[in-house]
Amino acid sequence: MEFDLIVIGGGAAGFMTAITAKERGVRRVTILEGTSRILEKVRISGGGRCNVTNASWIPAEFIGNYPRGGIKLLESFSRFATGDIFDWFEQRGVKLKIEDDNRVFPVSDSSMDIVGCLERSAKEIDIQIYKKKFVRKIIKTSSDLFQVFISDDEYLFSKKILISTGGNPSGYKLAGSLGHKIIKPVPSLFSFTCKENFLKECSGVSVRDLDLKILINEKLFFL
Ligand SMILES: Cc1cc2nc3c(=O)[nH]c(=O)nc-3n(C[C@H](O)[C@H](O)[C@H](O)COP(=O)(O)OP(=O)(O)OC[C@H]3O[C@@H](n4cnc5c(N)ncnc54)[C@H](O)[C@@H]3O)c2cc1C
């Protein structure tokens, strides 16, 4: 089977890219998801409510919330900013609301509205979605097509591919195998693992405007 675009990974990034590409004229688009569940992280995001974005309207200010990316992020957010996210979802029937701390959620407070919207939007424009298709290998053929392997006997061809595999190491390996240089990723959100039992009682507590001092391996961090 031959496609114009194969999107590897059925998460938020994969769905948005597939839908945008298709709407802009790329003809045969498919999403290959390695597990049995698409958009799983979106489903659990924001405690099941999905914090879609933040009501921050000026891209130059918005990028200050990210640990790095600077000018590259500014380029992206200048093309598709917070207001565009509101329009994107509202045009597809999902109303968003802004909470007191500027976080944006679906009015329903259910991440399933976002999951449903992305899935429906893809299906409506004939994007084929395949589950349990974990991509193991990609090679570039002599006819300038990508051959995307699920197994030695199962493969698809595509003119273009997009690797949107989130933090899964396979994505970096696939990109590396095609000659791409990987810039070491850094987390923007992460959790702490600690031995102290008393801290477990704080689980679920969220605090604003916090100054944090952490000692890890005798090194002091101020956050
Ligand atoms: C608990 C939690 C809460 C969060 N809450 C929020 C929130 O409220 N708001 C927010 O903006 N962000 C939130 N995030 C972060 C957000 O969920 C992620 O940034 C976002 O989902 C990443 O999307 P992605 O498409 O890049 O990657 P992913 O969602 O990780 O999708 C990648 C997909 O690729 C598949 N895959 C991987 N390797 C292969 C392969 N080789 N072949 C085929 N498929 C493959 C994976 O199975 C996965 O489905 C939260 C994250 C967590 C964990």
Image (tube, helix red, strand yellow):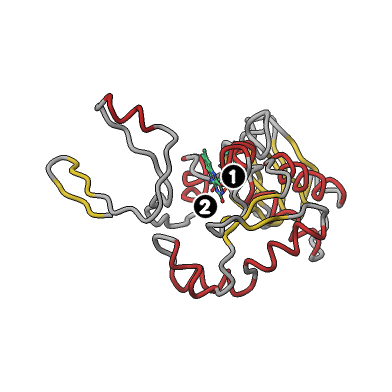
Please tell me how crowded label 2 is: few (under 14), some (14-19), or many (20+) other residues with Cα within 10 Å.
few
Residue 108 in percent (x, y) is at 73, 44
Q: Is residue 12 above or below residue 17?
A: above
Given the image, on which type of amino acid does mark 2 rest? Leu
Quadrant of ligand 1: it is top right
**Residue drawn at the location 71% of the way across and 46% of the way down:** 114
Instruction: Name the residue carrying label 1.
Output: 138
| Distance Cα–Cα, label 2 vs label 1 | 8 Å
Nearest the viewer among 202 and 80 is 202
- N-term mark: 2 or 1: 1
Q: Residue at x 32, y 33 (%)?
A: 193
- Amino acid marked by disc 1: Ile
Residue 162 location in percent, x, y? 63, 53
Say left or right for 62 vs 183.
Answer: right
| Residue beneath the point at 44% across and 61% down | 66
Query: Is the residue under label 1 in contact with that under label 2 (CB below 8 Å)?
Result: yes
Circle 2 is placed at which residue position? 178
Q: Say above or below: 10 vs 134.
A: below
* Image quadrant where residue 76 sits: bottom right
Residue at (68%, 56%) from the top-left corner?
97
